[in-house]
Image: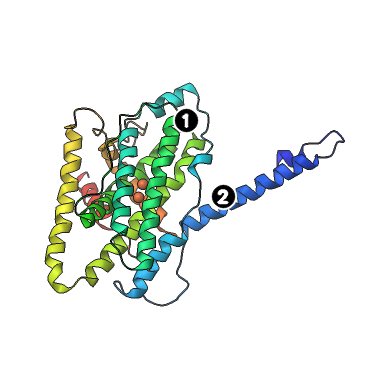
Amino acid sequence: MSDALAAPGRTGQPSAEARATAVAAAIAQAAVDQADHAMRNWTDPEPGPVRIGSPQHLRMFCNMLLQTHNPYKPAVIDWPRLDPEARQRVTSLPIWDIAVQTEGRASVRVQSFADTVADPLLRSALEMDGGEEARHKVVLSKLVEAYGIALAPEPEYRPPDDLEWGWLVTGYSECIDSFFAFGLFAAARRSGFFPAELVETFEPVIQEEGRHILFFVNWAAWYRRNLPWWRRPLYALKVMRVWLFLVWERIGIARGIDADGAAQDANFAMTGSEALGSTLSARGMIDLCLAENERRMAGYDPRLLRPETVPRLARFARRLLR
Ligand SMILES: [Fe+2]
Ligand SMILES: [Fe+2]
């Protein structure tokens, strides 16, 4: 029984108002818990094997995204009050500009790619994906506002000329960044760098990125298999160019070529563990990323493909670090 339920009114009994408040709070909490569980666990009710690239596969990965949507509202997030020290740690992290801009760019790129898609189910899944990116941006803006973090002026977010390129860049960059974010987030939670309430408040955003990369790798496999043979070589080249671009972008950012400071922190994903108060070695950090990646993907239908490339590269790097 909650405190409010137990709190006596003037007669020694809990007042009707206190009881109603407590019941409402309990119902609201149950709804939040249920939405949280639903976003992390999903299995297609249709049994049997699924061929990658088939119409059934398409239905499956679209339904996964659509049915695990968590309907939280950023505007009503109750940002926990932080003690001055924690607040200082959070506001001085060099990630807020790049985080807000990344979400802004992602939402425009995903949405504009969605507009090119004819299949209604795939289109609505992509629209949901883009909508969630836009919501991430709102969550971040609310956080920034709540803790008085100063942001660099934002650029204008425009759809790229090649809409497929924009979607591929967003998808593959999320595969890289989410993998490291999973580990960094867990490291910050362990080290107590972020107060527990703040970690809990932010947790659904991280899981959402997990759903996005799960959706993306399945879309990529489905898409490739459904391309006519004569388009495949050019498409493979394009994907290779996307990876090269992402590597180049991250090397550039690591060198801090963006002199006005707004973007110099994207490499935080790779180097941020110290800043988050973690004492883990590079190997320990990779192990944590791998374990978290596994854990976050564990609740979804095992017939869906999992993001493989980045974990595989991480395992390879780990062996070199021995
Ligand atoms: Fe996002
Ligand atoms: Fe995302």
Q: With 102 as the anchor, is 242 left or right in this view? A: left
Q: How is the image coloured?
A: rainbow
Circle 2: is it few (<14), some (14-19), or many (20+) Cα within 10 Å?
A: some
Find residue 59 and report its image quarter.
bottom left
* Of residues 242 and 6, the one drawn nearer to the viewer in this rendering: 242
Please give the residue where the numbered disc 1 appears in the rendered image. 146
- State the separation of the CA atoms marked 2 and 1: 22 Å
Mark linked to residue 32: 2
Find residue 263 and report its image quarter.
top left
Q: Residue at x 40, y 51 (%)?
A: 131
Counting from the top left corner in percent of width and height, residue 162 is at 19, 54
The amino acid type, in three-letter code, at marker 1 is Ala
Q: With 305 as the anchor, is 250 left or right in this view? A: left
- Vertical arrangement, residue 106 with respect to residue 214, above or below: above
The residue sitting at the right extreme is 11
Q: Residue at x 33, y 53 (%)?
A: 111
* Of residues 194 and 257, the one drawn nearer to the viewer in this rendering: 257
Label 2 lies in ligand 1 vicinity (Cβ under 8 Å): no
In the rendered image, the quadrant that contains the C terminus is: top left
Q: Residue at x 20, y 41 (%)?
A: 250
Counting from the top left corner in percent of width and height, residue 306 is at 33, 61
Counting from the top left corner in percent of width and height, residue 215 is at 35, 60
Counting from the top left corner in percent of width and height, residue 172 is at 25, 53
In the rendered image, the quadrant that contains the N terminus is: top right
Q: Earlier in the sequence, mark 2 or mark 1?
A: 2
Q: With 75 as the anchor, is 172 left or right in this view? A: left
- Vertical arrangement, residue 281 with respect to residue 223, above or below: above
Say what secondary structure mark 2 lies in: helix
Find residue 113 and report its image quarter.
bottom left
Say what secondary structure mark 1 lies in: helix
Label 1 lies in ligand 1 vicinity (Cβ under 8 Å): no
The amino acid type, in three-letter code, at marker 2 is Val
